[in-house]
Amino acid sequence: MKIFSFEKLSVWQKSRKLAVKIYKLTKNFPEDERYGLISQMRRCTVSISSNIAEGTGRHSAKDKARFTEIAFSSALELLNQIIISNDLEFLSNEEYENIRQDISEITAMLDGLYKSQSKINL
């Protein structure tokens, strides 16, 4: 079986694990949030790893960097949503801190990836 380049990226692996974590955590959210926070959080967390993967399929460094930028934005969107979820007490402080740490690591990795992709353009 062929292994694609994005599958080898640590940032993609971490973001995929974060998506699984978010899916599991949001199962415990109130039912009336099914089309609110649950849906939003699941979509943006999947968007992080999806944009990393899609970017690796692009030929120009500029396109690759753009998809990395979108993944970074999705991570910040998720951060906003976990802050609100914690405010609403849908997440425990421990769950919140754990996810926030994951997002911090992923955004730092995405920043490095973006910078390396942008240098190619110079």
Image: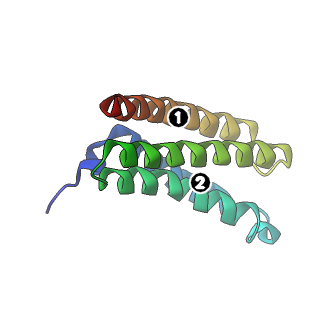
Residue at horizontal 74%, vertical 71%?
Answer: 35
Residue at horizontal 71%, vertical 46%?
Answer: 82
Of 66 and 16, nearer the camera is 66
Identify the residue at the far right of this view.
88
Residue count near mark 1 (Cα–Cα under 10 Å), binned few <14, some 14–19, many ≥20: many
Q: Where's the N terminus, which quadrant?
A: bottom left
Disc marking residue 107: 1
Residue 101 x %, y %? 58, 32
Real-space Cα distance between discs 2 and 1?
16 Å
Q: Amino acid at mark 2?
A: Ile
Answer left or right for 35 relative to 54.
right
Q: Amino acid at mark 1?
A: Thr
Residue count near mark 2 (Cα–Cα under 10 Å), binned few <14, some 14–19, many ≥20: some
Residue at numbered disc 2: 22
Quarter-wise, where is residue 83 in the image?
Answer: top right
Check disc 2 and report its element: helix, strand or loop.
Answer: helix
Answer left or right for 112 relative to 41.
left
Q: Where's the C terminus, which quadrant?
A: top left
Residue at horizontal 80%, vertical 47%?
Answer: 84
Residue 80 x %, y %? 73, 44
Of 83 and 55, nearer the camera is 55
Of 63 and 29, nearer the camera is 63
Q: Is residue 38 above or below residue 86?
A: below
Residue 43 x %, y %? 59, 62
Q: Is residue 43 above or below residue 88?
A: below
Residue 102 x %, y %? 54, 36
